[in-house]
Image (cartoon, rainbow, N blue to C red):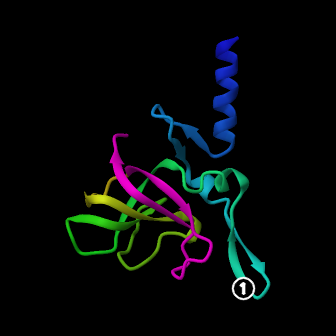
Amino acid sequence: MRSVVSGVVAGLALQAGFAMADDKRPTLTWDALGQAGIVKQQDRFVPHFPKEIAALDQKQVKLQGFMMPLDAAAKQQRFLLTAVPSDCGFCLPGGPEQLVEVQAKSGMKYVLEPIVVSGKLTLLRGDAGGLFYRLTEAVAVEK
């Protein structure tokens, strides 16, 4: 019976677009983040987040993606995490739902391979740069 309940809980977590990691932080998926959209409110357009993602605002999460540096440095303190690798250093590889601004606790070595980061997720509802998501106090995590 216990394994049946565990299986149901794991299945529900995956349907919601994230899974619980061994350390109890939800591991987000890009599919889940991609469910965000834009809606018109009065005279402007603002992000709209599904309730499963909205529930993670200000919570610790993990996310795997590709580093897109914002500075010309070997270690990156602030960078974009993207769903897919960038083909061009000047081109964004997706829309605002496929980018997460990362503010690291300390500089992270720039790599081309996918990385996993953990930090506090903030949903951005009026970001001047047009981003939807930010991870603060981020650290690199073993895959």
Picture coordinates of residue 98 (x, y %)?
Answer: 54, 64
Image quarter where the C terminus lies is top left
Taking the image as shown, residue 37 lies to the left or right of residue 69, namely right
Q: Residues within 10 Å of mark 1 (few under 14, many from 20)?
A: few
Q: Give the range drawn in magenta.
A: 115-143
The quarter holding residue 12 reads top right
Give the amino acid type for the residue marked by disc 1 in the picture: Arg
Q: What element carries label 1?
A: strand
* Residue at image point 30% right, 65% down: 77
Q: What type of secondary structure mainly makes up the magenta span?
A: strand
Taking the image as shown, residue 54 lies to the left or right of residue 104, namely right
Q: Name the foreground residue: 134 vs 84.
A: 134
Picture coordinates of residue 106 (x, y %)?
Answer: 27, 58
Taking the image as shown, residue 51 lies to the left or right of residue 72, namely right
Picture coordinates of residue 138 (x, y %)?
Answer: 38, 55
Residue at numbered disc 1: 44
